[in-house]
Structures are given as C-alpha cells and as structure tokens.
Image: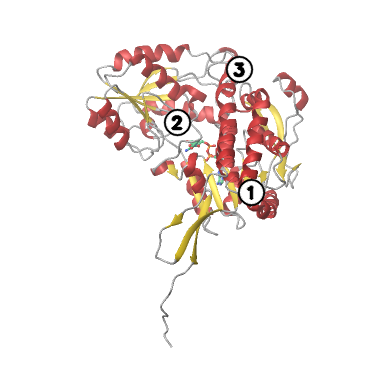
Amino acid sequence: MAERKVNLADVAQAAGLRTPIRHQLFIGGQFVDAASGETLATLNPHDNTPIADVALAGAADVDRAVEAATKALPAWRRLAAADRGRVLLKLADLIEANAEELARLESLDTGHPLRDSRALDVPRTAACYRYFGGMADKFQGETIPVEAGFLNYTLREPVGVVGQVVPWNFPLMFTSWKMAPALAAGNTIVMKPAEVTPLTSLKIAELMREAGLPDGVVNMVPGLGTVAGQAIAEHPGIHKIAFTGSTATGRKIVQASAGNLKKVQLELGGKGPNIVFDDANLVAAVNGSAWAIFHNQGQACIAGSRLILHERIADAFLDKFIALATSIRLGNPLDATTEMGPLTSQLHRDRVLGYVKVAREQGGEVLAGGKTPDGDLAKGCYVEPTIVRAKSPRDRIAQEEVFGPFVTVLTFKTDDEALAIANGTDYGLGSGLWTMNLPRAHRFAREIHAGMVWINSYKRVNPGSPFGGTGLSGYGREMGFDAMREYTQVKSVWVNVDAQIPPWYPR
Ligand code: NAD
C-alpha cells in the first residue's frame, strides 16, 4: 500500500484537538503497529481529505490480541465485581473530562454534527460505562427452591474472550454498548472498530489505560472486515462474537463462527416503520419523524425510514415535513450550527444516491432532495434530506435498508392496513407511532414486529433499556440486565446439605 504522509499535528490543530490522534493498534496495553506494517487512511467525510494513516490489523494481529486477552482473562474475571465496576466508573469520568476532545474527534471521523456529538454521543457513552460500572456488583445468580436437603444456586460467569465487531455509524457509542457490559461481567475483549471510523475507539483505549484497566483486558484491532473481522469470527480462542452491522455480514459471521460454536449476538439492519395516525399531534409528529430519519444523516439501524401516514392527514403532514426537511442546515460537522453533516464515506453516499434511481425506476415520486447539495459541499459525502413517495409497500425503497437521509412515504386508510404495512418487511428493529388513542397505541405496541416501539416519540435509548431486534434485524439484546445475561453463562451448583438419599444400588 502506498504510504500516505498525513501531518497529524496539522489535522489535529485544524479540528481543534488538544491531544495527539491515536493511529496504532492497541494490544496488551500498548499502542503498536500492525505486524505487516500496513496502514489505511481514514478520511474526513466533509471533504474526503485524509485524517490519519491508521494501522491496519491482519490475522496475525488478531492472534496477538486474542493471546493478550486470554492471558488477561483469569485475573480480570476473578477481580471483585465492584473493582471491575470502579474502572468503568473512572472511565466514565475520564470521558466527561475529555468530552470536547472526543466529540470533535467523532465529528471529524464520522461526519456527525458537533452539536450531536456533544449533546448525544459523548454523554450517552459516558452514561453507558457508568451504568454498567454500577451494575457490575449488582448482577447476581439465584437460589432455586429444589428438593429438600439440597441447596441449588446459580453462578453468572463471564463467557471468556469476547470478539466485538462494530460499524461506522456510531463508533463511540456502539463500542461502549458492547464493551461496558462485557467488562462488567468479567470478560476480556478483542474489539474491531470499522475501518473507516477507528479514531474514537483508539482514544477510548487510551482513556481505559488511564482509568487503570489491566493490560490485555481490551484490545483494539481496527482492520478490514473481510480480514480482521473474519479472523475474529473464525478464531478458536474467542468464545463469543457480538456484532453490529449489516444483515449480509451477520450471515457471514454466523457461518464463520460455527467452527468452535461461538456464542453469537447480532444487531443488524432495520427498516423502521413510523406510523402517523389521523389523531396525532401533527407538530410533534412532524418534528419527531424528521428526527427519526435525519438524525445522523439517517445512518441508524433504528431510523424511522418508512413514514406510514393516515391518508386523511398525509397532505397536511407532508407540507410541514417537507418544509422542515428542506430547512435543515447542512454543513461542516465541526461547525457547531450544523444540523446535518455528510454521510460517512463516498462509497456509502453513492449507495444512497443509487436508491434515488431505484425509486424513480419503480415509479416513486421524489418530494424533496434526492441529490448532493451544490457549491462547497459537493466535494464531501453529502446528500440532501430526501423524501420519496413509494407506489407500493412492496417497492424496493419500502423494503430495503437505505441507511441514509432517505425516507419512504406510504399511506393507509385503516389500522389493520397500517399494521400490515408496518409488519410487511423481514426486519424488526425500531418502530414508532403517533396517536392520542391509548388502546390503539397499546395494541400496536403488542402487534408490531420490532424490538423497540416508541409511542409519540422516536429513537429514545437508555443504558437501562433493552435494545435489539427480531427477524433479519438479529438476535440478542444490548443494554440493561439483558446485556449482562448475554455476556455471562449460567452455572448451576448442587450441594447436598442434609439430604438422606436412598441408595440406588442397595447392597
Ligand atoms: P457492515 O456489515 O459492512 O460492517 C460492519 C462491521 O463488520 C465493520 O466493522 C466491518 O469491517 C465488519 N465486517 C465486514 N465484513 C465482515 C466479515 N466478513 N466478517 C467480520 N466482520 C466483517 O455494515 P456497515 O455498512 O458498516 O454498517 C451499516 C449496517 O449496520 C446497517 O445495515 C445497519 O442497519 C447496521 N446497524 C445495526 C445496528 C443495530 O443495533 N441493529 C446498529 C447500527 C448499524
């Protein structure tokens, strides 16, 4: 690979960063180059200029990381749970102390508007480590009322060395969702951030070391999915893989993990239905629906990407919705007034624009956007907020995940029709509904195929609230007690306290 000379100090200064950008792998508590010496440039999606040449992990580096995680496991799992928690609590404090640095780095690498990185990504990341820091010594086994004379209790033991692979859409937050419960439960980690957005993960590794995390407990191996990701999924020394990404890659992970029958947890794609009934508070529904799809440029698995409108209010809703969408301020993510930044990569921008073509071919009507903005932003990965009316719920734009600022509009006449449309894809992740009718709201909450339902709201997340999907959106849950269950295995212990057991082989 041709070596690219990026002046890290200049990039950092231009982005308002105070500390050096980490660009090496983190293995066994040390920042190191890849065994092959290879690097991959991570780009600023605002203008596609290189930020840093980041070490590119290969299979040999994954081996080194697994070795370090295996070595660190016995001491980490034996540590008192409260002491593991203390490290996570310290980390949460350090994240807050470095909040501006992390927010800027995340915005630089991903294109998240700085106002979102500051107000959401960083505080939610700190909150996640804090929640699981507090959880570490509160998650416990049970005593089971079995037959007289026996004591039966369960232990919740860590799974072991855990492989974690995350996508590029929320790197800072998603690594916390995976690492915090895994660490609280006593596992050690080999984490692979997405190759296009590794920077905040490496910064977190630095803060983990500062928080006192023992060497080897967390290892970061940014690299290509088909190389480092595949090596993690196949590795016989890894006992569980937790993956967030596309459904297509999820299938590959399941196959690759079959060798040693790893435990698998999958958070995959979505095509979130967002239903607006004719009794909804329209102002709130318009605003919430715009947030549901345009936050983070629509690059969210839970995005409300199918806007399902009652036909009685569809025109009034769309007038307001289009006016709002077309007024969203696009711009450099590092400008604090920007409301929507670029998509995270050129490749992805082209993929999203490809769906505008698909929509037109299938008779869809583009009501807003559908192109890159003119002027200065044309050289970055920008796409305007795009609203498209589909002809049928079976159209590709109503079935396939676009993963961009692209919302598909459908209409309905009856509740049953709305439910059929909502449940008419193979995904089942986020969903929303806007209504003042309480029985209807609860009926839909029960009957929608989804892991999360937001009523008169959309896209709320909290470290205590389970997050995950059904169907092609995957299985397993992040956050809350469910995440602790995912990262532990149950051991049942039987003790003969005073049972008089009749002999089975009387002699
Ligand atoms: P992706 O599947 O291409 O990549 C995700 C990660 O997997 C990256 O780190 C990548 O390097 C790695 N990877 C790629 N091929 C691999 C392989 N063969 N083996 C192991 N790892 C491999 O997905 P993406 O395009 O980066 O992310 C977008 C997708 O993620 C969307 O479909 C979105 O819905 C999904 N997503 C889901 C959730 C959720 O919680 N359910 C959250 C965010 C994103």
Image vertical order of residue 347 relative to residue 240, above or below: above
Say which amino acid is labelled 1.
Ala
Image quarter of the C terminus = bottom left
Mark 3 vs mark 2: give the one in front: 3
Residues 402 and 370: in front is: 402
> x%, y% of residue 93?
65, 30
Image vertical order of residue 160 relative to residue 270, above or below: below
Mark 3, residue position: 332
- Label 1 neighbour load within 10 Å: few <14, some 14-19, many 20+: some
Name the side, left or right, on which 402 lies relative to 308. Answer: right
Question: Mark number for residue 402?
Answer: 2
Mark 1, residue position: 80
Quarter assignment of residue 370: top left
Residues 250 and 445: in front is: 445
Residues 279 and 463: in front is: 463
> x%, y% of residue 87?
66, 40
